[in-house]
């Protein structure tokens, strides 16, 4: 099948490995200090690796290549994650991933006086941004909050 796929110019490649790290499918690997397209069927042709290459060694070409095989890519990713001991990815939003929060074992017991205690917050830092009430979005609209502020003469 003729399709769009990447091509790596070995003369331009400096061996930094940025393209291999950017390739989410695992199609690019480092061989003898140079980037190589390891498998045609792992390359999806989207080009996440292109902007990462500092020397411009990666380009798109249309040539005879094996069709992209998403199932093989997923199996390879799972195999690598099992070998490295990493947890398999969670489907969906990362924020909805279940986590086990365990207390800090070095923390002092409750009720003991200490000068400094370690934080027990597992999701710190947390950033909250509030919308200013005087934004144009709220102009001409009266809310219960505004009525309360006007009654108290704070606004």
Image (spheres, rainbow, N blue to C red):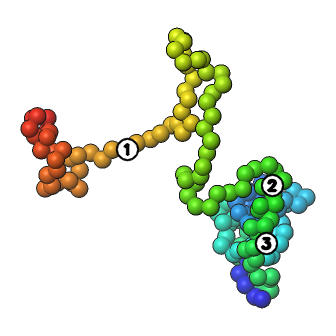
Q: Earlier in the sequence, mark 1 or mark 3?
A: 3
Q: Nearer the viewer, residue 56 or 153?
A: 153
Q: CA distance from mark 3 to mark 2?
A: 15 Å
Q: Is residue 150 left or right of residue 107?
A: left
Occupied quadrant, residue 112 = top right
Q: Residues within 10 Å of mark 1 (few under 14, many from 20)?
A: few
Which of discs 3 and 2 lies nearer the camera? The answer is 2
Q: CA distance from mark 2 to mark 1?
A: 39 Å
Q: Which residue is mark 1?
A: 129
Q: Earlier in the sequence, mark 3 or mark 2?
A: 3
User: What secondary structure is marked by label 3?
Assistant: helix
Q: Which residue is mark 3?
A: 72
Q: Which residue is mark 2?
A: 82
User: What secondary structure is marked by label 2?
Assistant: helix
Occupied quadrant, residue 128 = top left
Are circles 2 and 1 on residues that touch, CB within 8 Å? no
Q: Nearer the viewer, residue 85 or 11?
A: 85
Are circles 3 and 2 on residues that touch, CB within 8 Å? no
Is residue 82 depicted above or below 120 in this figure? below
């Amino acid at each position: 099948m003729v399709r769009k796929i990447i091509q790596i110019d070995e003369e331009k490649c400096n061996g930094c490995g940025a393209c291999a790290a950017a390739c989410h499918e695992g199609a690019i690997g480092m061989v003898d200090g140079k980037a190589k397209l390891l498998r045609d069927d792992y390359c999806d042709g989207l080009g996440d690796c292109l902007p990462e290459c500092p020397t411009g060694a990666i380009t798109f070409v249309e040539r005879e290549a094996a069709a992209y095989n998403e199932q093989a890519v997923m199996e390879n990713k799972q195999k690598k994650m099992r070998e490295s001991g990493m947890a398999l990815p969670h489907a969906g939003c990362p924020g909805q991933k279940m986590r086990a929060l365990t207390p800090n074992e070095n923390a002092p017991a409750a009720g003991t006086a200490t000068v400094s205690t370690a934080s027990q917050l597992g999701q710190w830092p947390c950033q909250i941004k509030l919308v200013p009430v005087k934004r144009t979005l709220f102009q001409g609209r009266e809310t219960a909050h505004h009525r309360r502020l006007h009654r108290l003469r704070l606004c």
